[in-house]
Amino acid sequence: MYSTLLIIHSLVRWLILAGFIYAVGRAYYGWFTRQPFNKLDNKTLIITSSLAHLQLLVGVWLYFISPITDFFLHNFKKAVHIKEFRFFGMEHGLIMLIAITLITIGSSIAKRKTADLDKFKTIAIWYSLGLVILLSGLPFR
């Protein structure tokens, strides 16, 4: 099960990354060109946020069955000095949790805005912050 979840988690990250780049691009475009916030924009907001949350759930599940994190948790003093174990045992999860929190906050605030310009601006700012943090925590291997 670990191998299957790892493959799913690794493949879905590219879909999420593409989705967030698209969402940020649409948000900046809508903000700077003062476009109306339409159904596609709303669907983009919902889908990207939902995919991020689904990926988080898979990641948490993976964290608790991973032999890497098992070693990290049971040999902390040794593992914290080994880059790969520290990254997957501590850094990756924390960075992704922060990124998804920012994205969730942005999505929640944007849904409550009434003006289209404010929605785009909110999504652009919060999703950009989330995307930068998300990129800093991706294992590009």
Image (cartoon, rainbow, N blue to C red):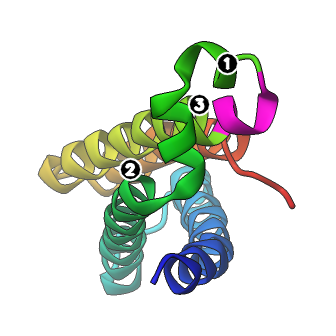
Residue drawn 83% across the image and 56% down it: 140
Which is in the foreground here, disc 1 or disc 2?
Answer: 1
Which is in the foreground here, disc 2 or disc 3?
Answer: 3
The vertical placement of 73 against 41, above or below, is above
Amino acid at pointer 3:
Glu
Residue drawn 66% across the image and 63% down it: 21
- Magenta-drawn segment: 82-87
Residue drawn 60% across the image and 45% down it: 134
Please tell me which residue lies in front, 86 or 11: 86
Amino acid at pointer 1:
Lys
The residue labelled by disc 1 is: 78
Q: Quadrant of residue 80?
A: top right
The vertical placement of 29 against 7, above or below, is above
What element does badge 3 sit on? Answer: helix
- Extreme right residue here? 141
Calculate the distance from the C-alpha at mark 1 to the C-alpha at mark 2. Answer: 51 Å
Q: Quadrant of residue 3?
A: bottom right
Calculate the distance from the C-alpha at mark 2 to the C-alpha at mark 3. Answer: 35 Å
Amino acid at pointer 2:
Leu
- Where residue 61 appears, as percent x and y from the top left, is 34, 63
